[in-house]
Image: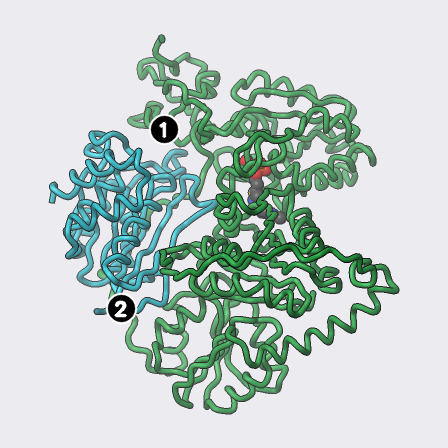
Amino acid sequence: MSVKSVMIVGVGGQGSLLASRLLGNLLTEEGYDVKVSEVHGMSQRGGSVVTYVRFGEKVYSPIVTEGECDYIISFEKLEAARYAGCLRRGGKIIVNTQEIDPMPVITGAAEYPTDVLEDLKAQGFCIDDFDALTPAEEAGSAKAVNLVLMGRFAACLNISKEKWAAAMERTIPPKYLEMNRKAFEAGYSGT
Amino acid sequence: MKRLLIGNEAVAWGLYHGGLGLISSYPGTPSTEITEFLSRHDDIHTEWAPNEKVACETAFGASLAGMRSACAMKHVGLNVAADPLFTLSYTGVTGGMVICVADDPAMHSSQNEQDSRHYAIAAKVPMLEPSDSREAYAFARSAFELSEKYDTPVLLRMCTRIAHSQCVVEMGEREETPLKPYVKQPQKYIMMPAYARARHPMVEKRTEALRALAEDCPYNTLEDRGSEIGIITSGCAYLYVKEVFGDSVSILKIGMPNPLPEKMIRDFAGKVRRLYVIEELDPVMENHVRSLGIPCRGKELFSPIGEFSQKTIREAFLREGVDVGELPHAQGTAPQVPARPPMMCAGCPHRGMFYTLARHHITVLGDIGCYTLGAVAPLNALDSTLCMGASISGIHGFNAARGKETEGKTVAVIGDSTFMHSGMTGLVNVAYNATNSTVIILDNSITGMTGHQQNPTTGYNIKGDPAAKVDLEALCHALGINRVRVVDPYDLKQCEEAVTEELAVEEPSVIISRRPCVLLKYVRPKRPLTVESEKCRSCRRCMNLGCPAISMKNGRARIDSTLCVGCGVCEQLCAFGAIGGEEA
Ligand SMILES: Cc1ncc(C[n+]2csc(CCOP(=O)(O)OP(=O)(O)O)c2C)c(N)n1
């Protein structure tokens, strides 16, 4: 199998770290060679963050460059557009339609490009856009957006729900497990 | 035990299993997690030191006492620890000693892009450089033996990508290493001229021995795959080379960048028709290869600036006319979208003080921490940021240079952790050499920028246990500053008064702007504020705060209730009473 690449993108503080670790643990358990590249430090302060997950028989590079990405999972609309150039031909973007204003928009120096996903679709991008925030809040917290998205993404991988459940148990602290299970389920059954 | 680990956790396990007894560090991305992971073990001593020099010297003391020790820091931290490093090279060690240093190509979280391999060469100590978590574990673990066998501290070089990337690591068990007996050895450990002169030749001899080791050690490996193209590479550049070429070219992978294996390099170069040296940042290996009289291609193809990727490698070889397959086909191009730079959080206690400073239109010498974000729009409240501590020493020089013209129109701002790190000495200088300078200590009771580490002002140690707490007011007094006052940065009136008054007086002064970081667990957010749309006159005054929770929607200010923590700063600003909380 050739190496597959996933990018998890969003705004610092949205919980992409947990999502990438969950995915990393799941894929390792499946027997793949896995590399995960995380972001720590400065950019976590509300900046744009990107995490890479790559898996296959043998993976060298931990990062993903233009045109290489099979799946982009985006926690926020604008961020999906920012990294769209990384998607390979035939790849797929899964995106939470939530809008979070970046500083240039807040200060009025720029406008939030609301039609950005439609423009990408018109270019031929395969985009699965949906509201992940509402089901996350229903599950217990806006922070569970990451698991809603993982649930949605699960359909793209041929891995059973039981194995996802086991990976969640290994990755998520017990006191948040129930909420995250619910969030995952909401994303999973929504597909 | 087999686990998915980031490079820093792998280093932590490597050190622990290698018999580590003490680690003392100062936080700094991307090195911080090494020490954080180690602090979970109760059978070793772990601590946050006030700065890297103290950390390195603490590790030295432990080594002298016969214990295997380490310190960890980011690349610029090694500048601070350089003084002990250079002479540690002469003294050598008793217990093995490892200095972990993490470079940050592309400056994800740093103020420069320096290449710490130069330190290994200049200080004449061996350096190891892993290219993934697996090697990070193995190299860290074996570094103690190397250190003890060759009687030298060992530098372990990480970089952001390796420090923060995960792969599966198979781990062994901890090797318990009892303390070596302490024996007084003046000639080895007292580095006064007479003894140091005798140590220097030993350093040179050691380098010779390490050169011999370099020719035959597990760190440097040869992948012999034909004679057309040969690549000398190291660190994460190795991963990108493998990603592009797989097993189709010959590779000399360097895991010990100092000292380099001359014979291996000569043999390798002699075997291949085209030789490339591929390394991030400076041409350290390349210069060495050229100094041996061997022609190669390197920095003319691979920039000394920023990080590489498989794309960097592929594009360079396409330009060289080498068949590396096509560039990947993208689905399309990304549209231009507004940037999303990092910013101060909603409710950040730094904001109120910066808003006040921005209103005064004064020169602000800044420092390094979350408050460096006060530099960006709309606050635009900083004039300089150099390195940790430079705000206070800098304002002193600035005012000494311009005298009355700028005294009373300049301030220095510095965080609590940064003040402990290297601000105190600068403040002594302000008092001692007498400039009329005003210093603002932004005391948010934590080391914020690097992800919430305790420091001597917080009252807790690395494990979260109560610890001696520095009394900042008393400290500033003791350093020679008579005027010291404390304000709450959520109270704009207090900030305004303090800044106006302290700028006006004819003597040095310190304002401590005190309020804990909103992200601290014990800080309870207050009820979010709301805007009464009818009262909002769209003056945009609240927008000058640069608070991520406030935006303009349909011409009126709006507060995002999921972000607002009810700090109340915007409420104090609004001239029309449009912002407020629901009555409780
Ligand atoms: C010599 C050196 N060591 C470490 C760092 C990494 N670093 C940047 S800011 C900072 C501490 C900031 O803490 P503080 O001064 O309390 O400000 P805060 O971020 O909490 O506002 C650290 C450790 C650095 N830039 N330089």
Q: Residue at x 47, y 20 (%)?
A: B569
As drawn, the chain in green is B
Q: Which numbered dot is residue B563?
A: 1
Select label 2 or label 1 by which is in front: 2
Residue type highlighted by circle 2: Glu
Crowding at label 2, few (<14), some or many (≥20) Cα neighbours within 10 Å? few
Judge whether residue B398 can be spotted in this image: yes
- Percent across and percent down for residue B434 are 82, 33
Q: Residue at x 40, y 65 (%)?
A: B309
Which sits in the foreground, B403 or B436?
B436
- Helix or strand or loop: what does disc 2 sit on? loop
Q: Which numbered dot is residue A57?
A: 2
Crowding at label 1, few (<14), some or many (≥20) Cα neighbours within 10 Å? some
Residue type highlighted by circle 1: Leu
- Of all chains, the one bearing label 2 is A
> Relative to A99, is B9 on the left or the right?
right
